[in-house]
Image: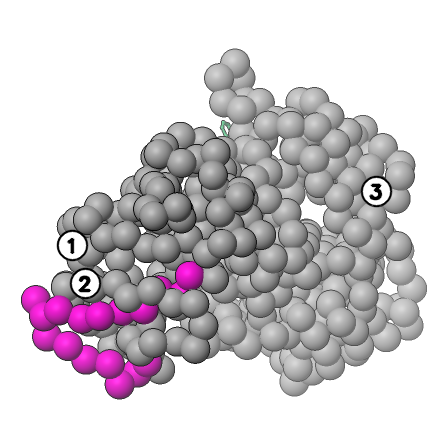
């Protein structure tokens, strides 16, 4: 059981640096929550305050309703795994796994049981007698994870534990962690700046920027309905195209004016956008919502000039210039090709476009 509640959590260093600024966040019991954001946005500081490794400047942290601000880290019953997992070099894997338990006075048969369960779960049964230097990076990472698992804490706090692994191993460990969460049902807070980790692992993701929470929700909801241009431009790669535009009137209907190109606004968005008429907005469309062929839904043609074609294998990313000069990217089928400088007609899926206030960046007229 562990519901972790952050209320107005703030961390200031000295007079100047506000690393975490009045963060409110509730991590539900048994939830896999991902904290996502660019470097320096306050993710690790937030995690360290929850773990009790960093003093809290203001606000309250509760675990299952109990305020833990002044509770010793050892008494919070949370296990932390960092990016730089320092294993004890002179101890075997088995020694590394059992060390914390022995300190706590857990009896030998219980230690053995937990090591066996954990080693099996992580597929490191055959490595228990080895020392860290006799392990690959990925195996060492498993042992570090194992050290947290054997403690059977009420919740796990992970601070970028996969970022030292190569792409293939990282992807395998992602799956591993999802499985572990499913098997154990424990609360997990996983910090990362990797959007793929966030999208695939999190039941909910919390996106931070400059010490503040910008948006919290299930990954697909955040992807489909970003609250502002920051989230829109941060999640997914290549990110959403964000273009300077105006909402204008044309024969009684609203259009997106990308001067000189104009795109229609679907009637169900008109009412919400009407107040923004004739004012500057940011128009957003994801690369995957631009197509090389007409789509069987509301789409508008968009003529562009090819700047570059990046063939990635399963797909092609087209970088192209709009007639006004702004560049956009489009994710197209793997067989697409066109020489740089040539003209191409794309089709914009009008049901999946986004509008943001040009000044504040906040989303306008979301459905
Ligand atoms: N001990 C410290 N003294 C002063 N400033 C600090 C200290 N620790 C962190 N900061 C600042 O607090 C801010 C948040 O740091 P934090 O480590 O939480 O970021 P992060 O989101 O984990 O970044 P990364 O993705 O790079 O790990 C940064 O601007 C950082 O420079
Ligand atoms: Mg960090």
Give the class, few, some or many, for how many residues have Cα within 10 Å of label 2's Cα (few <14, many ≥20). Answer: many
Please report whichever mark, 2 or 1, sits nearer to the chain's N-terminal start.
2
- Determine which of the numbered discs, if any, sits on residue 63 in the image: 3
Residue 139 visible from this viewpoint? no
Label for residue 323? 1
**Residue 167: percent from the left, percent from the top?**
43, 71
- Mark 3 vs 2, N-terminal side: 3
State yes or no: Cβ of the residue under disc 3 lies below 8 Å from any atom of ligand 1: no
Give SS at disc 2. Answer: strand
Residue found at x 47% / y 67%? 165
Magenta residues?
333-350
Pointers 2 and 1 in contact (C-beta within 8 Å): yes
Question: Total label count?
Answer: 3
Q: CA distance from mark 3 to mark 2?
A: 54 Å
Q: Do callouts 1 and 3 mark residues in contact (Cβ within 8 Å)?
A: no
Sooner in the amino-acid sequence: mark 1 or mark 3: 3
Q: Is mark 2 within 8 Å of ligand 1?
A: no
Is residue 348 rendered magenta in the image? yes
Whether 262 is drawn above or below 39: the answer is below
Q: Residues within 10 Å of mark 1 (few under 14, many from 20)?
A: some
- Residue at screen point 82% across, 37% down: 62
Q: Nearer the viewer, residue 299 or 169?
A: 299
Secondary structure of residue under mark 3: strand
Residue occupying image coordinates x 35% and y 42%: 249
Position of residue 145 measured from the top left corner of the image (x, y, whole percent): 65, 64
């Amino acid at each position: 059981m562990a519901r972790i509640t952050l209320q107005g959590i703030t961390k200031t260093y000295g007079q100047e640096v506000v690393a975490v600024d009045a963060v409110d966040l509730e991590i539900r019991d048994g939830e896999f929550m991902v904290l996502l954001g660019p470097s320096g946005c306050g993710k690790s500081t937030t995690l360290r305050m929850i773990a009790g490794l960093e003093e809290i400047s203001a606000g309250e942290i509760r675990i299952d309703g109990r305020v833990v601000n002044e509770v010793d880290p050892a008494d919070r019953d949370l296990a932390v795994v960092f990016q730089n997992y320092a294993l004890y070099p002179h101890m075997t894997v088995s020694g590394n796994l059992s060390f914390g338990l022995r300190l706590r006075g857990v009896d030998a048969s219980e230690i053995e049981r937990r090591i066996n369960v954990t080693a099996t779960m992580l597929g490191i049964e055959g490595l228990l007698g080895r020392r860290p230097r006799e392990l690959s990076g990925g195996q060492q990472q498993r042992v570090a994870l194992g050290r947290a698992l054997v403690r059977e804490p009420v919740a796990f706090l992970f601070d970028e534990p996969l970022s030292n692994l190569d792409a293939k191993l990282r992807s395998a460990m992602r799956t591993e962690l999802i499985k572990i969460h499913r098997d154990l049902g424990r609360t997990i807070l996983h910090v990362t700046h990797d959007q793929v980790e966030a999208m695939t692992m999190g039941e909910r993701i919390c996106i931070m920027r400059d010490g503040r929470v910008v948006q919290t929700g299930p990954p697909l909801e955040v992807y489909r309905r970003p609250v502002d241009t920051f989230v829109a431009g941060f999640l997914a790669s290549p990110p959403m195209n964000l273009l300077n535009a105006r909402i204008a009137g044309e024969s009684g209907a609203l259009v997106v004016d990308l001067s000189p190109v104009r795109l229609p606004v679907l009637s169900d968005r008109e009412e919400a956008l009407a107040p923004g008429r004739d004012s500057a907005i940011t128009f957003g469309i994801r690369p995957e919502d631009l197509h090389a062929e007409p789509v069987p839904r509301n789409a508008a043609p968009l003529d562009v000039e090819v700047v570059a074609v990046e063939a990635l294998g399963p797909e092609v990313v087209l970088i192209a210039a709009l007639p006004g000069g702004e560049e956009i990217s489009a994710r197209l089928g793997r067989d697409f090709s066109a020489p740089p400088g040539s003209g191409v007609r794309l089709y914009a899926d009008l049901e999946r476009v986004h509008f943001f206030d040009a000044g504040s960046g906040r989303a306008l007229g979301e459905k």
